[in-house]
Structure formats: C-alpha cells, structure tokens
Amino acid sequence: MKIFLIGFMGCGKSTLGRKLATKLGYDLIDLDHQIEKNTGVTVGDYFAAHGEDAFRKLESDTLKSFDYPKNCVIATGGGTPCFFDNIEWMNQNGTTIYIEMPAQALAKRLESGMAKRPLLRNLTAEGVIEFIENKLAEREVFYHKAALVMSGISLTADDIRVEILARN
Ligand code: S3P
C-alpha cells in the first residue's frame, strides 16, 4: 500500500511520515529529499536557480516516475497536490491523507523553518501569517481531494495507522 501524506508546509508530513513508516514497517519516501538527491542541490537552491515553474515540473516528474516499493509512506511537499494532475495521480496510485491545520498553528510551527523554505524565506514575521492564510485558502480545494482528512493538531502516527487499517 502507498500512503501519500499531503498538507501545507509545517503540518508534520515528514515527521509523522517517518513515525508512521516505522510503525507499519514500510519504507519512507520524502519527495523533497528525493528531488535533492536527484539534482544534488537543495530545494531552496533549485528554486533560486531555476524558478518555481521548473521546480513544479520536476516535482511532478519525480512523483510520477519514482520506483516505489510495494508498501511505503510518501511525505510530499506542501505544493505537490496543487499542480498538474498530481492529486488525481496520487489518488489513483495510493491512499492520500490530508493533515489539516489552521494557519495560526502552521505559522507558529514554521517560525524556525522559514529560511529553508523558498516561499517563506523573504517574508517578515507579520507577513507570514497573511501569506499562509491566502495560500492555504488557495490550496485547500486540492488538499480536500484527499481520501482522508485528519486534523493535524495532536495527531499521532498511531492515529493515522488505525484510520488506514480500518479502511483497508
Ligand atoms: C513547498 C513546500 C516544501 C517544498 C518547497 C515548496 C510548497 O515542502 O516542496 O519548498 O509549495 O508548499 P514542505 O511542505 O515539506 O515544507
């Protein structure tokens, strides 16, 4: 089974993904890490050198061409479901879970990780909450196409495991 974790930057996809994969005995694939491995540069540097459009194309190609093991958890990037037909592709190829979190909570969790995120790195502390609110509103239509929506507030890997096993 392939489990795709989707949601805004800072919602916990990578951390929960790692824990969930361990609990299930599955492999974890972190899409951003995979892109960094393939290109040899960080996502931030790739954005800076080639721009967002090129990154989105590469992200979609990486998502669709990766040689996934039979059972795995995939931590996607915050924008992955929102470009091309990526969310439809993920829904056809696995179980998608949207980790939902309000803008205020995301802003708090992103305080320390702004510099490594190209979309946030030039924003002021005041600007970040407005940016998150707007971006989240724009992206929610894609996120809500997920098979499962779970609140990220106090969500544990075990909560996800139980939900997944109940469905499959
Ligand atoms: C992005 C989120 C990032 C990364 C890139 C773009 C986005 O991943 O893919 O910086 O558009 O929301 P995380 O959600 O893991 O931070």
Image (spheres, rainbow, N blue to C red):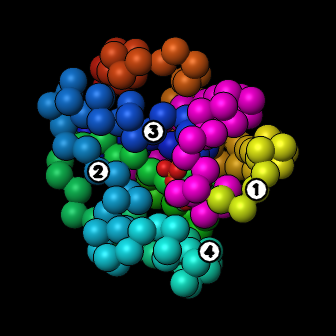
The residue under label 2 is which amino acid type? Answer: Ile
Q: Which residue is mark 3?
A: 13
Residue that badge 2 annotates: 29
Q: Classify residue 134 as left or right of residue 146.
A: right
Is the C terminus in the top left, top right, bottom left or bottom right quadrant? top left
How far from the left and from the top, in percent, is residue 94? 36, 45
> Which callout, 3 or 1, points to the residue nearer the camera?
1
Q: Amino acid at mark 1?
A: Leu
Q: Amino acid at mark 3?
A: Lys
- Going from N to C along the chain, the mark reached first, 4 or 3, is 3
Residue 99 falls left or right of residue 136: left
What's the mark number on residue 52?
4
Q: What element does badge 4 sit on? A: helix
Per the rendered image, the range of residues in magenta is: 91-120
Residue located at (38% from left, 31% from top):
16
Q: Which residue is mark 1?
A: 123
Label 4–label 3 contact, CB within 8 A: no
